[in-house]
Image (spheres, helix red, strand yellow):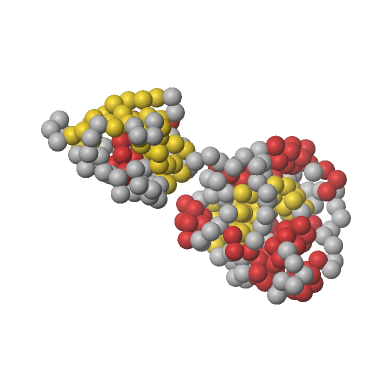
Amino acid sequence: MAAAEPAVLALPNSGGVGAGAPSGTVPVLFCFSVFARPLSVPHGAGYELLIQKFLSLYGDQIDRHRKFVVQLFAEEWGQYVDLPKSFAVSERCKVRLVPLQIQLTTLGNLTPSSTVFFCCDMQERFRPAIKYFGDIISVGQRLLQEARILGIPVTVTEQYPKGLGSTVQEIDLTGVKLVLPKTKFSMVLPEVEAALAEIPGVRSVVLFGVETHVCIQQTALELVGRGVEVHIVADATSSRSMMDRMFALERLARTGIIVTTSEAVLLQLVADKDYPKFKEIQNLIKASAPVSGLLSKV
């Protein structure tokens, strides 16, 4: 088989298609994981139709947030080879759907072009209840200043603002891409997913706000499930209970989510003293982040 670009696929959300008419069809063995099921497809069917067949057979077992490659068993090689995009079924064959491996460990590198900031529910009604709320407001504001300097997109959510109020006045929302109300605990709303899809090359989300064990935790886990690397800023996130905060951060770190600090994020994004806007970032960190009980209880 001539070398060709493999078809790496993001799976659609639509359902499967029928088996087709008996005449003008070709038998194909569809393999996924430990399963193998025969099905007939129209002569000349391409990889898009093959994907629909895989969904009709194994849809309840396929994680549609992952990417897959379709492979064809090549008799001449005695093994599976990546299916070229130009492939069309012309004779009896065997194909399999292979999930691309998720990287289990991440380096945690941050670059301005591949990073977005998520500010979660920093609202007025939380002020008296959240531990060290004034400190995380101060650090959160510093992060948003860096986002403006470096041109990093920012999404802000507000949990049930009718009852819990708007984002606190100390947080300057100038230049923020989205400010969204929500009732869901996670920030991963349809509008947020659409906004992420419009930004090419997004790899990392820097996440901060409240509460660590509820909205921050659920947002982080949902993003990781979608293949996004998450950096939680420990000195810019808190809860009503320090025990809840501590165990949430420990749990999230064990899942591969990066628990970091605001200064580490600021300097990692510029990476070099010769970076054009390093002086502006340096001015942000001349005064250290507040020394509070947060850092002794990570």
Which quarter of the image is occupied by the C terminus? top right
Q: Nearer the viewer, residue 141 or 131?
A: 141
Residue 15 lies, in percent from the top left, at 32, 38
Does 266 sit above or below residue 73? below
Q: Nearer the viewer, residue 56 or 246?
A: 56
Q: Is residue 158 left or right of residue 282?
A: left
Q: Is residue 5 visible?
A: yes
Which quarter of the image is occupied by the N terminus? top left
**Quarter-wise, where is residue 13 in the image?**
top left
- Say which residue appears at 70% left-offset and 47% top-offset: 258
Residue 276 lies, in percent from the top left, at 70, 75
**Quarter-wise, where is residue 96 in the image?**
top left
Residue that lies at the very extreme toward the left in this rendered image: 23
Does 7 sit above or below residue 270? above
Residue 134 lies, in percent from the top left, at 78, 57
Residue 264 lies, in percent from the top left, at 76, 57
- Say which residue appears at 41% left-offset and 32% top-offset: 79
